[in-house]
Amino acid sequence: MPRKLKLYLDTSVLNAYLDVKNPYRQEITKQFWSKLENYQVFVSELTIREINAAQNEELRHNLLELMKDFECLSVEGEEVRMLAEEYVLRGIIPVKYVTDAIHIAVATVNSLDILISWNYEHVVKLKTKRGVNAINALLGYNPIEIIDPAML
């Protein structure tokens, strides 16, 4: 039996599942969700922090409930910090959005196959994909696919 691909979901994917203001994106995310049993799914402590920052208590509860069965990865440690800093130093991710670099670094350091995001501004774009994988190759990490839920 082939191994299941390992997916990392950033916070934008969880938010989209509940976002009634964008029904098209919500529907795609729900279709994506129905396929998750075929994968190993991961989030990180950063995802939990971002969700816990939500002002709306019901939303926060529902988001945490969505991810209760996913494995949670640590963002602590020198390796994640250094790799995220490298993405920022090389201009792949703007310093203002260092949390996006941390999401990518966590997925990379943990040898996950695919990072899933709805963030087209800093994550799901050609410049980021090429830059991240160039740095990963330079530093001895595996390449990582970066896609939106519709691409899975």
Image: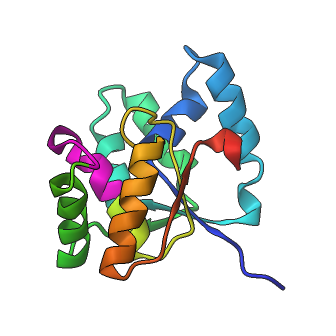
Q: Residue at x 21, y 42 (%)?
A: 94
Whether residue 134 is visible to the viewer of this picture, yes or no, is: yes
Whether residue 62 is visible to the viewer of this picture, yes or no, is: no
Which of the 4 image quarters holds residue 138? Answer: bottom left
User: Does the segment drawn in magenta span residue 101?
Assistant: yes
Q: Residue at x 27, y 37 (%)?
A: 53
Residue placed furthest toward the top: 21
- Residue 59 vs 104, above or below: the answer is above
- Residue 14 vs 27, above or below: the answer is below
x%, y% of residue 58? 44, 29
Residue placed furthest toward the bottom: 1
Which of the 4 image quarters holds residue 107? Answer: bottom left
Q: Which segment is the magenta one?
A: 92-103
Residue placed furthest toward the right: 1
- Residue 39 vs 33, above or below: the answer is below
Q: Residue at x 76, y 64 (%)?
A: 38
Question: Horizontal placement of 96 versus 126: left or right?
Answer: left
- The dominant secondary structure in magenta is helix
x%, y% of residue 126? 47, 44
